[in-house]
Amino acid sequence: MDPKAWIMTHLRELVRFPASGFSAGLVAEDIYEWQATLLGPPSSPYEWGIFFISIRFPPDYPFKPQIVSWKTPILHPNIDKPRVFHPLLVTATWKFGTTVKELLQALHDMLLHPKVEEEDNYLADVARMCS
């Protein structure tokens, strides 16, 4: 299956089965460029926040992960705007077949449960505050 077919499958899934904590869609008519919106999870420091994320699909998708850029300012150990650290975004730990919905759910969950281990964060001082 070519990259466009994979990407369209993800888009259809998000349209048919919307999630309560996030949404995503195409930027203009470019199937490889998406914008996502995450809502801050209840009972978290990010509650009531609205966070914008850029998602770029590489030409060799789904064999390589999407390129995710965080657009909204945030104080979080795994986010150093625009960089985001999550195992699903690292080529070495990328899982073939991971959907955009699963990726966005993982990023939403990361707002509740930051990864504070030394090798998992960009901002060590913020990680210490979270642990």
Image (cartoon, rainbow, N blue to C red):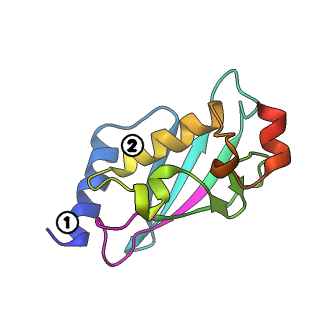
Residue at 73% from the left image edge and 35% from the top image edge? 46
Q: Position of residue 16 (x, y in %)?
A: 27, 41
Pick the quarter of the image with the N terminus: bottom left
Up the image or down, 83 lies above or below 128; here it is below
Mark 1 or 2, closer to the camera: 2
Q: Nearer the viewer, residue 41 or 88?
A: 88
Up the image or down, 112 lies above or below 15; here it is above
Q: How many marks?
A: 2
Q: Pointers 1 and 2 in contact (CB under 8 A)?
A: no
Q: Nearer the viewer, residue 20 or 123?
A: 123
Residue 63 belongs to magenta span: yes
Q: Position of residue 25 (x, y in %)?
A: 43, 57
Up the image or down, 4 lies above or below 46; here it is below
How dense is the environment of label 1, judged by Cα within 10 Å: few (below 14), some, or many (20 and up)? few
Amino acid type at circle 2 is: Glu
* Bounds of the magenta segment: 53-66
Q: Position of residue 80 (x, y in %)?
A: 73, 59
Question: Is residue 100 shown left or right of residue 4?
Answer: right
Q: Nearer the viewer, residue 6 or 115?
A: 115
Question: Is residue 25 shown left or right of residue 36?
Answer: left
Quarter of the image for residue 91 reads bottom left
Amino acid type at circle 1 is: Ala
Residue 65 belongs to magenta span: yes
Circle 1: element type: helix
Q: In this figure, which residue is indicated by the disc labeled 1?
A: 5
How dense is the environment of label 2, judged by Cα within 10 Å: few (below 14), some, or many (20 and up)? few
Going from N to C along the chain, the mark reached first, 1 or 2, is 1
Q: In this figure, which residue is indicated by the disc labeled 2?
A: 102
Quarter of the image for residue 18 reads top left
